[in-house]
Every structure is written in C-alpha cells, then in structure tokens.
Amino acid sequence: MITEEEFIRISTHMKQHYGIDLSQKKVIINGRMENYIKSNGWKNFHEYLNAMEADRSGALEKVLVNFLTTNHTYFMREFEHFEYFKKEVLPWLKKKESSRKDLRIWCGAASTGEEPYMIAMVLADFFGMEHSNWDTKVLATDISTKALKQAIAGVYTAEQLKNLPEQWKRHFFTPIVGGAQYMVKDELKKEVIFRQFNLMDSFPFKRKLHTVFLRNVMIYFDDKTKKELIQKVYDNMEPGGYLFIGTTETLDRSSTPFQIIQPSIFRKKEG
C-alpha cells in the first residue's frame, strides 16, 4: 500500500513535470501502480521512484506516465464541435488560405486516435475532390506512448465505430478479423501525424496554428497551469484561429485572451 510520503512524491513529480494534478488521487495511484511495482521486484514505491530517477533511458518514466494518464475517448465525442468546424471554421480557412492551401491543425490530446482521425475525416468530407490540392495534415500529440501506439495502429472494434456515419465507416475503414474489428485505411492514416509531446514543454511550432483541439485534457490541470497553457496556445495561433476545449471544461472569462464564441469554442481576434 502506498504511504503518504510516497504518494506526495509521485503526485509532486507528475505536477512538476506534466502539470497533472493528482493531489486527490491517492487510491487511483495505488490501484494502478501497486501490482506493477510488486511484480517487477521493487519493495515499495520509493524503490521504484529511485530506479526511475536513475534510469537514463526514460523507460520507467514512460511507464509511470502511461499508468497515470487516462485515455478515455470515442468517435463522434462532442460531435457539435466537428459540425461547427465544418460549417464555420473550414469555409473561413478555405478563403483565408486560398493561395497557400496549407492548414495547420493541432490535436493536443490525441489519446488513442479517435479525435484526430475524426478531424481528418471532416477535412476530407469538406474538401472533397479538392482535398489533394490542400495540405490538411493533422498534427496529433499525446503524452502517453501507450495511447499513441494504439492510435498509430489504427485498429478499432465494431462497437467503437458504431456511432460513425455508415459512409465514413465504408470509406475510411477496412473490416478485419471477420468484421469484429476495423482498421483505418492508409489514405486517412497519412493525413494524421502522431508525435509524443508534453503540453508543459515549450511549443515547437515554426508557423502559427489555425485551429487547436485541446479537449478533455485540462481537467487534470490546476488554474495556474491551465492559464499558462492557454496563453501558449494563444501566442502560437494565427489571428482568427479557433480553439476547441471539452464541453465540460471552462476557461476563466476574465483572464483568457480568447474571444468566447460558445462555452467550449474560442477564437483569437482577427488581425
């Protein structure tokens, strides 16, 4: 069983390095980590943490992050965002970028891939025959290497796809294992670039972004961390660019630099 001291050590590490607030999650940390620690021969959490801090390869750090980050997502989640993206954001972007034909879209909490693939499907649907003339690749990042591995594989159960429009399922997925599972087709896979990235690090973008999906990730951050992250997003965004957050999440209206379009849709002032 995790001691108070060990719990403080783990939760402090996650807060300092990843912005994730686990200060009320002692039972969860213990439940997710205890068996792993015992079965790998460490006597207690301190021993594991000492080994992790001494591990130059970073492998044990990855284990910790994969255990303590939650990757719950599904296709069509908060679909009203994709509707708005297609009806309002993309017509504006198509006009704005008509000469360069280069869209810069980032999904900052890619999890197991459902969300970035959804964005890519909406883009393909919107541009239709013109799609090949545009660079609409979606950058999809997540902190969890385990979730990203699943996202890159692009294999989902029939149950996971049940809410997708039938024509999307036919067009973008191939049935495998007797139709119990489906694999994302290569034409969609090549539209999404998956990378591991810690939102607490400085942003590596060379050019400013048009749209950022940062949905259902800030629930793990305290107000200060959230505010700093939102400021970084704002600074790395084109004028007029859009930010989507989870429908259950909030931004402090008095301190956010963004204009509020709807409770979970924000925009950087144009020009």
Image: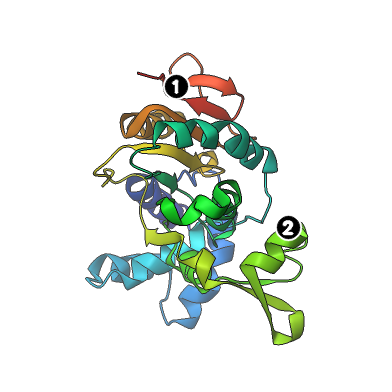
Give whichever of 195, 26 is nearer the camera: 195
Give whichever of 91, 217 is nearer the camera: 91
Q: How crowded is mark 1: few (under 14 residues within 10 Å), some or many (20 or more)?
A: many
Residue type at the position of mark 2? Leu
x, y (%) of residue 246?
59, 38
Residue contact between numbered discs 1 and 2, judged by CB atoms under 8 Å:
no
x, y (%) of residue 115?
57, 53
x, y (%) of residue 227?
40, 28
- Residue at image point 42% right, 75% down: 43
Give whichever of 101, 47 is nearer the camera: 101
Report whether residue 215 is seen. yes
Q: Residues within 10 Å of mark 2 (few under 14, many from 20)?
A: few
Report whether residue 222 is seen. no
Mark 2 lies on a secondary structure that is: loop
Q: Which mark is residue 164?
A: 2
Up-down: is 15 above or below 47? Answer: above
Up-down: is 102 above or below 144? Answer: above
x, y (%) of residue 234?
37, 29
Residue 180: quarter of image: bottom right
- Residue at image point 66% right, 39% down: 83
Who comes first in sequence, dot 1 or dot 2? 2
Mark 1 lies on a secondary structure that is: loop
Between marks 1 and 2 in the image, the one whose residue lies nearer the viewer:
2
Q: Which residue lies furthest to the bottom in this view?
A: 177
Q: Which residue lies furthest to the front in this view?
A: 129
> What residue did someone put label 1 on?
258
Residue type at the position of mark 1? Phe
- Residue at image point 66% right, 66% down: 171
Quick check: 160 left or right of 26? right
Quick check: 46 left or right of 260? left
